[in-house]
Amino acid sequence: MIIFIWDFVAENILGQIMDWMYARLVETFGEFFGMLNEMGAQLFDYPWTQAVVTLFSRFGWALYLVGLVVGLFEYAIESQNGRGDIKGVALGAIKGFLAVNLFTTVPVELYRLCVTLQVSLSSGLTGLLGTPTGIAAAATDALEFINGPNPISSIALVILLGYSVFRTFFSNLKRGGILLVLIVVGSLYQFSVPRGYTDGFVNWCKQIIGLCLTTFLQTTMLVAGLMIYKDNMLMGTGLMLASTEVPRICGAFGLDTSTHVSVGGAMHTAQTAISTARLLIGSVG
């Protein structure tokens, strides 16, 4: 009888200890990936980064002024044919003024907000692991699954878990640099916005939104998958694998997180600006 009571008490104590250890493990993962995302935001606190952002902010202002002058010339030419639209010119100037003022600050602040929300939500999710859900039994089932008749499946699940973690790790690690590149590329669109051509800049805004959304969703889904993994290895692995597909899904809905589209459109805009400047210089000469 005494041995039975001791085994019962020891099992409960062991369950509480394993519950606490697993909760701390998942919390550590959440804090680690949150720290990686915060490193991306802290990148913009360095003096050299601020210097680069300031340089391209002034470059964006220069392109805005050139675009505004070109827009006025285009309005004058169109007015001679009776097709001038002064409201469109004024609206383009206002849009361009807002864009050139905000394209270096709003992306960074939005990114920081998403990181803060992700860290807070991950911390709240890991707090749910403190409820008594039978961690000892779940751990026993997991050990039986690993040592059972399907060791190959167990090894495959562990490999997929590692793949998801490392894929998310490298994605979070480079996200701050991608944001810096997007800000630099965003300066090239300031020539076309005051002239009323906003398609390229709208796509750039979608990329910023996609980057911030990926920052929030990818780590949150990874932490949620780790929470489920202890009770259901297959479901937890599936959720963690789904976290690696967040950038692709965002891209399918127009929120592409890469930079190749923006760079191509921005280079075309820059070439247009150079050609227009040469034309104006030739006309004045």
Image (tube, rainbow, N blue to C red):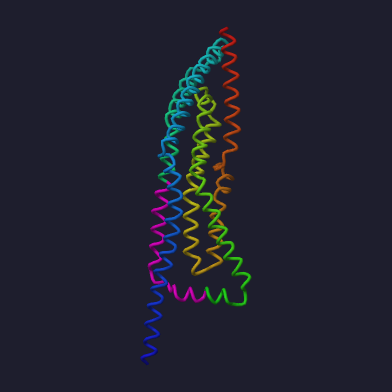
- Where residue 69 appears, as percent x and y from the top left, is 50, 16
Instruction: Check the image and name the residue furthest to the right.
Output: 152
Q: Quadrant of the C terminus?
A: top right
Instruction: Check the image and name the residue furthest to the top.
Output: 285
- Residue interval drawn in magenta: 114-141
Nearest the eye: 232 or 86? 232
> Is the magenta region chiefly helix, strand or loop?
helix
Nearest the eye: 238 or 48? 48
- Where residue 162 appears, as percent x and y from the top left, is 56, 60
Q: Quadrant of the N terminus?
A: bottom left
Q: Is residue 131 above or below residue 44?
A: below
Q: As drawn, is 46 to the left or to the right of 158? A: left
Q: As drawn, is 219 to the left or to the right of 163? A: left
What's the residue at 42%, 60% (across, down)? 28
- Where residue 195 appears, as percent x and y from the top left, is 52, 22
Q: Is residue 136 above or below residue 157?
A: below
What's the residue at 37%, 82% (across, down)? 9
Which quadrant of the structure image shows residue 270? Answer: top right
Nearest the eye: 124 or 34? 34
